[in-house]
Image (cartoon, rainbow, N blue to C red):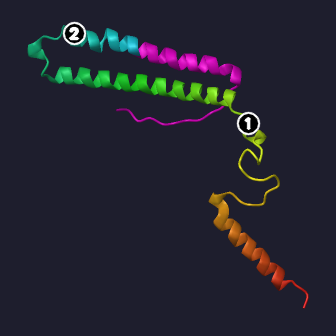
Amino acid sequence: MEQRVNIQYSIDMDELPTEVHRMLKKGSQIVDDLASKEMQTFIGLEEKEVLSLQTLQHIESARKKLAAIDYALNDATNIVSGFINLQVSPPPDYVSAAERGAPENSTVPQPEIQPQWNELTKKIEQFKNQNAPE
């Protein structure tokens, strides 16, 4: 199989339909190519010809095209899912502390930063003690 790389880039929201359509069209073209070439080759094979290097090459080619179709559909799925999630979810800035389960103006850190919070609190106390008037 050919090597693949994930890329990330931004486009305007109004360009999303065009981009998804391009991906789906690409997948459809690969399906057409697969049906017109490899699958027709398989249909035309005689039973005595199937155990050959040529058959193996056609199978490998068909598998690569199937993978390319799956990649195109997966990319389109991810974009459409992300778009739908964006439409049904409020932006992160609008999620209040109460909705996150924390009281308003809470200074309690999230669990994932608790160790760093404790260390910072300890260093602040040490600094205060060093600079306290005697």
Pointer 1 and pointer 2: residues touching (CB < 8 Å)?
no
Q: Is residue 13 left or right of residue 134?
A: left
Q: Residues under labels 1 and 2: Cα distance?
A: 53 Å
**Position in image of residue 59 (x %, y %):** 25, 22
Check the image and report above or below for 119 versus 113. below
Q: Is residue 95 left or right of residue 132?
A: left
Q: Quadrant of the N terminus?
A: top left
Mark 1 element type: loop
Question: Residue at (17%, 11%) from the top-left corner?
Answer: 45
Q: Quadrant of the C terminus?
A: bottom right
**Position in image of residue 77 (x %, y %):** 52, 26
Q: Nearer the viewer, residue 95 or 73?
A: 95
* Badge 2 density bin: few <14, some 14–19, many ≥20, Cα 10 Å: few
Query: Which of the two discs, 1 and 2, labels the residue nearer the N terminus?
Result: 2
**Position in image of residue 122 (x %, y %):** 73, 75
Q: Is residue 77 magenta?
A: no
Check the image and report above or below for 34 versus 2. above
Amino acid under disc 2 = Ile
Q: Residue furthest right?
A: 133
Q: Nearer the viewer, mark 1 or mark 2?
A: 1
Q: Which residue is mark 2?
A: 43
Indicate the quadrant where residue 112 lies.
bottom right
Q: Nearer the viewer, residue 98 or 41?
A: 98
Q: Residue furthest left?
A: 48
Check the image and report above or below for 92 versus 121. above
Q: Main secondary structure of the magenta part?
A: helix
Indicate the quadrant where residue 53 lies.
top left
> In the rendered structure, which segment of residues is drawn in magenta?
1-30
**Position in image of residue 89 (x %, y %):** 69, 32
Q: Which residue is mark 1?
A: 91
Question: Residue at (69%, 72%) from the top-left corner?
Answer: 119
Indicate the quadrant where residue 66 lies.
top left
